[in-house]
Image: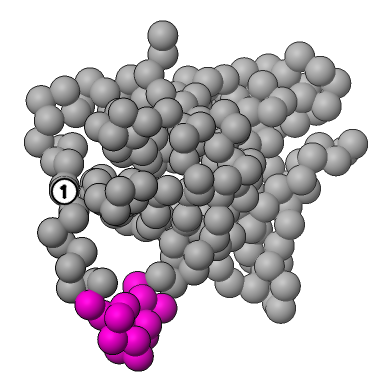
Amino acid sequence: WVLADLGTNGEFALVLADGRVLLASVPLGPALEGVGMRFGRLAEPGAACAFLLTPAGLAPVRLPGGPDVPGITGTGYLSLLARLRSLDVLDPDGRFVPGATPLARKVAAGLGAQAGEARLGLPGGLHLPARDVEELLKVKAAFDLALSRLLAEAGLAARDLAAVCLAGALGRHAAPADLEALGFLPPGLGGKVRAVGNTSLAGAALALADPAARAWVEALPGRCRLLDLAGDPGFSSAYLARMRFAYGEPS
């Protein structure tokens, strides 16, 4: 199974059946925390945390507890891009395109440009600029690369995994179907995703309270091996090849 922490840095652990652990770390950047995005917000009352497709087009789902605010959380951006991909208003390379269905055309009617940059108008006075799509593509490419390299190093296919455990607050709220639709995960793996919350805090508490757990943790470094992905001469080319909304490198 895989443990993955989604944050500014992405930490990954592939736990093998014999107890060995393969580790990898990649920079994901702050986009999923709302930093650097045009309407990026932390999870606060009134911010858009997801988007639905309705007969009238896109509709934001907002966090309860306050008035609407002009902001989108990290999970909101993932949801938005997944909806746009499902309509083919966003192509696999992250470019805005006119829709082919009546609903897609309705959503694509918000396409325009400002200062030479393409952007898509959204409900509530929001819009999605092309640069924000690129920032999310960077996150996807790094996540995809780490997961696929760990599996390749272990000689495993995605179907061999028992689970993908997502740690942290964002991992708790990200929709597995959105991650699969955007290529963070290979097809079919979304159903094996489990949200496990703040594992570092829970693990520290367990190690303090349970001597057997502490002994297990103390022995763990001897079973771990780190893959230096950034030090691989082919890292840049493999990363750039994954700058698309599909899992893995294009065939």
Question: Residue 211 magenta-drawn?
Answer: yes
- What main secondary structure does the magenta stretch of the protein show? helix
Q: Which residue is mark 1?
A: 225
Name the residue at 26% across, 72% down. Answer: 216
Residue 99 found in image quarter:
top right
Q: Residue at x 33, y 20 (%)?
A: 241
Q: Quadrant of residue 33?
A: bottom left
Q: Nearer the viewer, residue 212 or 90?
A: 212
Vertical placement of residue 201 versus 107, above or below: below
Vertical placement of residue 179 versus 208, above or below: above
Question: Which contiguous range is marked in magenta?
Answer: 200-215
Coordinates of residue 232 in the picture (x, y in percent): 12, 30
Left/right of residue 91 with respect to residue 140 in the rendered view: right
Q: Residue at x 42, y 37 (%)?
A: 140
Question: Residue 32: x and y, percent?
Answer: 44, 53
Which residue appears farthest toward the bottom when viewing the image? 209
Let me know if residue 66 appears in the view: yes
In percent of width and height, residue 167 lies at 44, 62
Q: Residue furthest right?
A: 55
Answer left or right for 205 relative to 121: left
Could you classify mark 1 by the number of other residues whose Cα lies within 10 Å: few (under 14), some (14-19), or many (20 or more)? few
* Residue under the point 40% across and 49% down: 2
Picture coordinates of residue 187, whole percent (x, y): 57, 29
| Residue 119 visible to an observer of this rendering | no
- Which quadrant holds the C terminus? top left
Please state which of residues 57 and 219 is positioned toward the viewer in this rendering: 219
Residue type pointed to by label 1 = Arg
Magenta stretch: includes residue 205: yes
Label 1, secondary structure: give it. Answer: strand
